Amino acid sequence: MKFSLRGLLIGSLGAAALSFAPLAVSPAHAVDDQEIVLTGHKVQIVHNGGGTSDSTNFNITFTNYGEGDCDGGEDDAIVSGIEVALSPYSCEPICDGPCVDAPITPLFAFDYVIDPFVSHTVNHQTYGTFFGLNPIGEGPGTVSARIVLLSRPVGGCGSWNLNVEATGLDLSSITSNPMSIWLNDADDSGPFCFDINDAIIGNLIPKTGPKVRRGVRR
């Protein structure tokens, strides 16, 4: 399967270790006539001293409305994968409406095609897992993800909740809101851009060791 954010210059960086704990999600700006719609998100950008020491953790819920037969399965994110990218820019300066064939080439701080997912079904719940090197086949970064199939909406090809964690990134260009997240499916119907106005952006919180309680001399 081949993906591309058509007409866009993509700088791929990546790495990860996945947390399976569910995250709270917030409403996201979306264009009503887009094939993919983002219905919830939580995005965290962690700066950790420059270079490729930054990390990101994002949880998104999205629906693909597809066309007709859902493009023979290419609109199924678990079966055919999903491309995700993070940009320091908001959507409007790049494209007003769906971003298909957007003429401007913004720099993406993180871009990755998550495919193939390993599909699982447990207690009637379908989900997929992924782990890969970034750059692909090289590293030293890794990308890890978990995607869960949700109830299929009327007229849609499917809805999913996706959690991605990546480390070993250079996210120095993402310093403030708004930023944006971009999605594309296997039939290359996008890319589709969504403004993120409430990303958590900041430095890594240092870990503190356990407190040692000194004995009281009697």
Image (cartoon, helix red, strand yellow):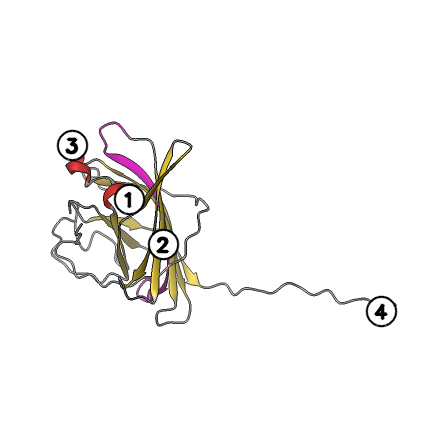
Q: Give the residue pinned by disc 4.
A: 217
Q: Earlier in the sequence, mark 4 or mark 1?
A: 1
Q: Secondary structure at mark 2?
A: strand
- Disc 2 packing (10 Å; few <14; some 14–19; many ≥20): many
Task: Give amino acid for label 1.
Answer: His
Q: Earlier in the sequence, mark 2 or mark 1?
A: 1
Q: Secondary structure at mark 3?
A: loop
What whole-number distance in Å separates the C-alpha atoms at marks 4 and 1? Answer: 62 Å
Nearest to viewer (mark 4 / mark 1): 4
Q: Give the residue pinned by disc 2.
A: 144
Which residue, as the protein is rendered here, is positioned at the far right?
218
How many numbered markers are drawn? 4
Q: Earlier in the sequence, mark 3 or mark 4?
A: 3
- Disc 4 packing (10 Å; few <14; some 14–19; many ≥20): few
Q: Give the residue pinned by disc 1.
A: 29
Check contact, mark 4 vs mark 1: CB within 8 A.
Answer: no
Q: Secondary structure at mark 4?
A: loop
Quadrant housing the C terminus: bottom right
Q: Earlier in the sequence, mark 2 or mark 4?
A: 2
Nearest to viewer (mark 1 / mark 3): 3
Place of residue 6 in the rendered image (x, y in percent of width and height, measured from the top left): 13, 54
Task: Give amino acid for label 2.
Answer: Ser
Place of residue 99 in the rendered image (x, y in percent of width and height, measured from the top left): 16, 49
Residue 117 image label: none
Nearest to viewer (mark 2 / mark 4): 2
| Viewer-closest of 82 and 56 | 82
Q: Which residues are magenta?
A: 153-175
Task: Give amino acid for label 4.
Answer: Arg
